[in-house]
Amino acid sequence: QEAALSAFLAGLDDSSLMFIRREVYAKFFVLAPAGEEYFKQSTTRLHFIADRVVSSTLELYKKPKETVEDLSGLGLRHVGYAIPTEMFGPFTTASIQVVRMLASDDLAVEAFTWSVNLISRVLCRVITEGSTVVMRAINANSGKQLRKAVACAPRGKRALWMLNVQVGTQSI
């Protein structure tokens, strides 16, 4: 599967990559219109995100441990951005649909599908585990909720609870 995915990605020219960049978001916004609220970046940034999704699918085969570490860090940043996990399913579906439009090799599509689904599951797990009561209070920008969340902690650990969010070996 790695070889098939690698051959497919190596065979993509600039116009195909631009097609992926455009179509992923077009399909995603149809599947999840609320996603437009979370993708308020420049076109350049959106293209970077789409490129990273595509390249991460192959990296997951070549360097699984390092890629999962990178994804854990990325997931923790998503916690800070208050990105709901419900957005990952439609984004994954949109990515798979676009690759199906371009790929003639079923094995490459299967490899991409497996990889992008795994990436989505890792990110969702990290976001779920990293969404502590303190982080939810911070994302809500509520001092009252933050005081209530920290009040649960033992006195000697309150500062640590406010400052440390950790999932696996990654922390913010």
Image (cartoon, grey):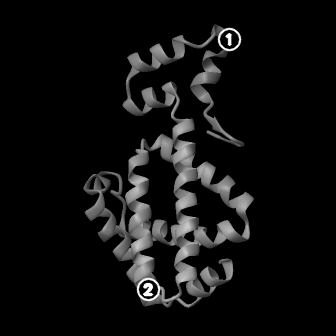
Q: Quadrant of residue 162?
A: top right
Query: Looking at the image, which residue is at 68% across and 53% down?
Result: 69
Q: Nearer the viewer, residue 12 or 104?
A: 104
* Near-viewer residue (124 or 169): 124
Horizontal and vertical percent for residue 43? Answer: 36, 69
Q: CA distance from mark 2 to mark 1?
A: 57 Å
Q: Secondary structure at mark 1?
A: helix
| Direction from residue 154 to residue 103 in the image, left or right | left
Extreme residue toward the top, this view: 155
Q: Is 31 or 147 nearer to us in this picture?
A: 31
Residue 138 placed where, x, y %? 45, 29
Q: Amino acid at mark 2?
A: Leu
**Position above or below: 163 against 125:** above
Q: Position of residue 20 (x, y in %)?
A: 41, 78
Which residue is at a point 47% across and 65% down the rendered structure image?
A: 49
Q: Are marks 2 and 1 in contact (CB under 8 Å)?
A: no
Identify residue for label 1.
156
The mark found on residue 37 in the picture is none
Residue drawn at point x = 64 percent, y = 36 percent:
166
Q: Nearer the viewer, residue 24 or 97?
A: 97
Front tag of 2 and 1: 2
User: Which residue has dot 2 on it?
Assistant: 102
**Total count of labels:** 2
Residue 34 relative to residue 103: left or right: left
Picture quadrant where residue 9 is located: bottom right
- Choose the circle earlier in sequence order: 2 or 1: 2
Quarter of the figure with the C terminus: top right
Residue 96 spot, x, y in % from top left: 44, 71
| Residue at 52% in and 83% down | 106
Q: Residues within 10 Å of mark 1 (few under 14, many from 20)?
A: few
In the rendered image of this protein, does residue 46 appear above or below residue 104?
A: above
